[in-house]
Amino acid sequence: MSSAELSVFIQALGVHAPARKLTNEELSSMVDTSDEWIKTRSGISERRIAAADENPSDMGAKAAAQALTRAGLTPADIDLLIVATMTPDVPFPSTACLLQAKLGLRRDIPCFDVSAACSGFVYALQVGTDMMRSGAYRHALVIGAEKLSSVVDWSDRTTCVLFGDGAGAAILATTSAKNVGVLGNLLGADGNNAELLHCAAGGSATPATPESIKAGKHLLRMNGKEVFRHAVRVMSESCERVLAKCGVKSEQVAWFIPHQANIRILEAVASQLNVSMDRFPSNLDRYGNTSAASIPLALEEAWRAGKIKHGDLVLIVAFGAGLTWGATLLRWHEPTR
């Protein structure tokens, strides 16, 4: 079968969230904040926090195992592994390679990470889709896994209230059916605004030193006001562009699954698109912003709840540090068992 005949779809989803729930009330005893302040500005009530020995590769492995079971596949069936993360277990080797070993995947398959922050899952999905369309792979595992609690400054009330940990996995497969699965996508970036959401140290430009660690340079910093402004504009434009690319109108889309960053961002994007929030499923109140894990977590929850059905048009869209963004339009495809 030529690559031109292949459609790529999500065959199965899996998720994992750490057991510990950190509520707004608990946070208010750690920093100068309150449940009302956090809810009003973000829509978040609680978030999951990974244990000290629970790494992104561990969470990703659990999410992947669930997806494999749901797909009726074994680790030997996976031909390609892509992990989206901004909080890798270690600088190198890749979290994907660590996850390959934990899952017991074959040793002759490509495994690599994608670093696009909160847009990571959308980036990884497009890379996986394009590789699958070559016809060289039967099943790809695309994972978003994050341990943001490890890079958050727990003394900064403007950021520590927003983020949580978790993982989501999607298994990609191909079919000869037309007009199903991934219909269109786009990616973008603007490195000129990198300072709006960044970690100043920890790389080769500024290696870890006692002084840099004491100064908190290895922790997440964000200009919330500017990130909000860019996020609303770019996410709205990305949705409009991918819909136009596919010849689809917003009213034809059954579900919009946005990166779960902030409820006010979601409401503003829905307003820009003139779409009801009823079509924007959100689990932000229970998980917070889990970066690259947020879309698969929200997508799996909507699917498991029976909201997303075979044939539905689903649009996922994200925005993150970089600055990066991306959108993908799918026609949901439930394979015949």
Image: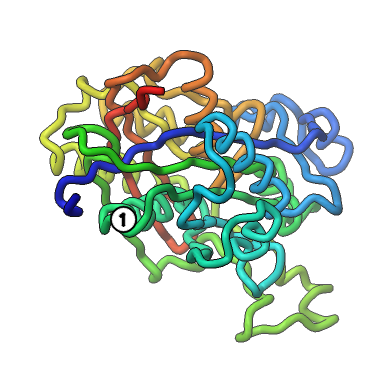
Position of 136 with respect to 72 (left or right) is: left
> Relative to the observer, which residue lies in front, 20 or 202?
20
Q: Residue at x 27, y 45 (%)?
A: 238
Residue 216 versus residue 164 in the image, above or below: below
Q: Is residue 5 visible?
A: yes
Q: Quick check: 190 left or right of 102?
A: left
User: Could you tell me which residue is drawn at 36 percent across and 28 percent down?
Assistant: 256
Q: Quadrant of residue 316?
A: top left
The residue that appears at 50% across and 48% down in the rendered structure is: 77
Residue 154: give x, y in percent of width and height.
79, 51
The residue lying furthest to the left in this view is 247
Q: In the picture, residue 102 is in which quadrant?
A: bottom right
Q: Which residue is mark 1?
A: 187
Indicate the secondary structure of the residue bearing disc 1.
strand
Pick the residue in front: 201 or 307: 307
What's the amino acid at mark 1?
A: Leu
182 relative position to 56: left or right: left
